[in-house]
Image (spheres, rainbow, N blue to C red):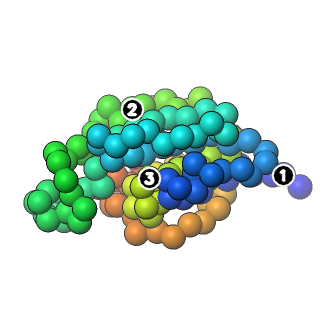
Amino acid sequence: MDVRPWVKNVCREEAERWAMPGGAVCVSVTDPGSVPARLPRFDGVLRLSFSDWDPARGAPERVLGHSGPIVEFASDHAKRLAAFLAESRGKNMVVHCEAGVSRSAAIVEAVVASFPEYEDAGGVRFTNPYVRAHAVRALEAP
């Protein structure tokens, strides 16, 4: 029986406590200006910093928890994500953001949609559709 690599979205706190054996890489998404997550137990870490914002949801001042400038998920983030996933393909993967349900969920769904060998290991999701759409496009690019 083949063992498939998995991908899972979690909150920052869970990622910082991660102790599951077997090794994994991590995509760490933090709010702009926040302290980087402490992630010593991962085999590799990609650190991205962007706001949990979808332009379709309205003006930045209406974003829950917004304090400071909005940093959109941009083409640079997408390119770095695609490069990290290409080099980490086939490895178990944890994706975290602050709450673990929106930005991380979007990236997990993009990985599962783009790389069928990955098993979705679950997690609570209120996916950010803006991040998901841009991540899927980046992962499908040649």
Q: Which residue is mark 3?
A: 97
> x and y percent of residue 12 in the render?
49, 53
Q: Secondary structure at mark 3?
A: strand
Q: Is residue 7 rendered to the left or right of residue 57?
A: right
In the rendered view, does 99 fall on the left or right side of 115?
left
What x and y, as percent, mark residue 69?
16, 45
The alpha-carbon separation of the residues under discs 2 and 1 comes to: 30 Å
Which sits earlier in the primary sequence, circle 2 or circle 1? 1
> What separation in Å lies between label 3 and label 1 (alpha carbons)?
30 Å
Which residue lies at the image location 56% right of the left edge and 66% below the top edge? Answer: 123
- 21 vs 33, nearest the viewer: 33
> In the image, is residue 84 above or below residue 122?
above
Position of the C terminus, as image quadrant, is top left
Binning the other alpha carbons within 10 Å of mark 2 as few (below 14), some (14 to 19) or many (20 upward) gives some
Q: Which numbered disc flags the more N-terminal residue, 3 or 2?
A: 2
Q: Which residue is mark 2?
A: 79
Residue appearing at x 67%, y 34% in the figure: 43
The answer to whether 64 appears left or right of 15 in the picture is: left
Q: Residue at x 34, y 43 (%)?
A: 34
Q: Which residue is mark 1?
A: 2
Q: Secondary structure at mark 2?
A: helix
**Quick one: label 3 or label 1, which is nearer the N terminus?**
1
**Which label sits in the foreground, 2 or 1?**
2
Name the spot of residue 110 as percent of width and height, x first: 47, 52
In the rendered image of this protein, does residue 63 appear above or below residue 95? below
Q: Is residue 80 visible?
A: yes
